[in-house]
Image (cartoon, rainbow, N blue to C red):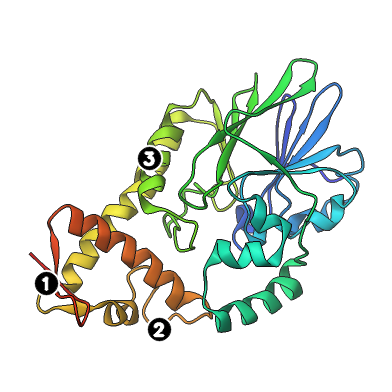
Amino acid sequence: MTQASFQRGSVQVYLGPKSGKYPDGNQVMVTGADTQVAFDMPMVAHALSGVFDAVDMVVLGHVHEDHLAGLGQCDTVPLWVHEGDLEAARSWDGMTRHFGYSADVLEVWHERMVREFHYQPRPHAIGYGDGHTWDLGGGVRVRAHHMPGHTTGHCVLVVEPEGVAFIGDIDLTGFGPYYGDATSSLAQFRHSLQAVRELDAQVWVTSHHRGVITDREVFETALQAFADKLDQRADKLLGMLQHQPQSLDALVAQRLVYPPGYEAAFVNDVERRMIEQHLHELLEAGQVQCVDPALGLFART
């Protein structure tokens, strides 16, 4: 059997390459006296020989291609998904609404998801809600804490009594928070970044990049740097509007989130969605105004 990269009590963590750097992720397993559960199923699952032989169910913290990539290792066990992301797991139609990309982007993205992430709809996925608890036996429990923003259904899964929090795509990367899909929300992400601080946890496990953090001060510092990206993006957008009014198309072309020149099928749609949300915040705060509604031109106040 493959050696766990981290173990505490009932929890084992198998790190993907480069601490689960996208497109891979980190695999979390929790074993109680009666039940064994896997959190998410990233690509690294395909390399974990024997690890899933006794798995009784899979719980997804949220639905995105990289968190479904290893589900073929556990085809016959129940799959639990937060009700906010449930339809995205159940069908491609649900997934298209989840992403909200344009039709031509979705066509390209579907082909890549099948080829690289082994995507298949999961029509029998079971929904769960905020606070849902799974009793695994022997005093081991998993509790879902709904922390949306990345997706509508994004959850942090806390293993009790160990205090291990799988914080998913509150992943503390240098890229910062991602809220570029139709079901994403900048406002909800801000709230979740505060809520995750308040969890009763001693260990934090990310889907990507950081892996396992066992020191609260380190966690707090990394979380603050991650959260600061939101205000840094807002400041950058204000700078883009400093000298002359700009249309949304012009702002997308300049790139708020991704580096200039970075190209992928989904990038323009994602930039548009994230910029729109920042513009809404800045309009509400009175820092930006729409100077020409007919042309959709925005400027600093």
Q: Residue at x 13, y 59 (%)?
A: 287
Q: Nearer the viewer, mark 1 or mark 2?
A: 1
Marks 3 and 2 sit apart, C-alpha to C-alpha, by 32 Å
Name which residue type carries label 2.
Answer: Gly
Question: Which quadrant, please, contains the C terminus?
Answer: bottom left
Marks 1 and 2 sit apart, C-alpha to C-alpha, by 22 Å
Q: Which residue is mark 2?
A: 261
Q: Which residue is mark 3?
A: 191
Name which residue type carries label 3.
Answer: His
Could you say which quadrant of the image residue 221 lies in? top left
Residue 2: give x, y in percent of width and height: 84, 46
Q: Residue at x 65, y 18 (%)?
A: 161
Marks 3 and 1 sit apart, C-alpha to C-alpha, by 28 Å
Residue 286: give x, y in percent of width and height: 12, 56
Q: Is residue 24 visible?
A: no
Would you place residue 170 above or below residue 91 in this image? above
Please tell me the numbered disc located at residue 169.
none
Name which residue type carries label 1.
Answer: Gln
Residue 92: give x, y in percent of width and height: 69, 67
Q: Which residue is mark 1?
A: 242
> In the rendered structure, which disc, 1 or 2, sits on the residue that comes first in sequence?
1
Q: Nearer the viewer, residue 261 or 105?
A: 105
Q: Nearer the viewer, mark 3 or mark 1?
A: 3
Residue 261: give x, y in percent of width and height: 40, 83
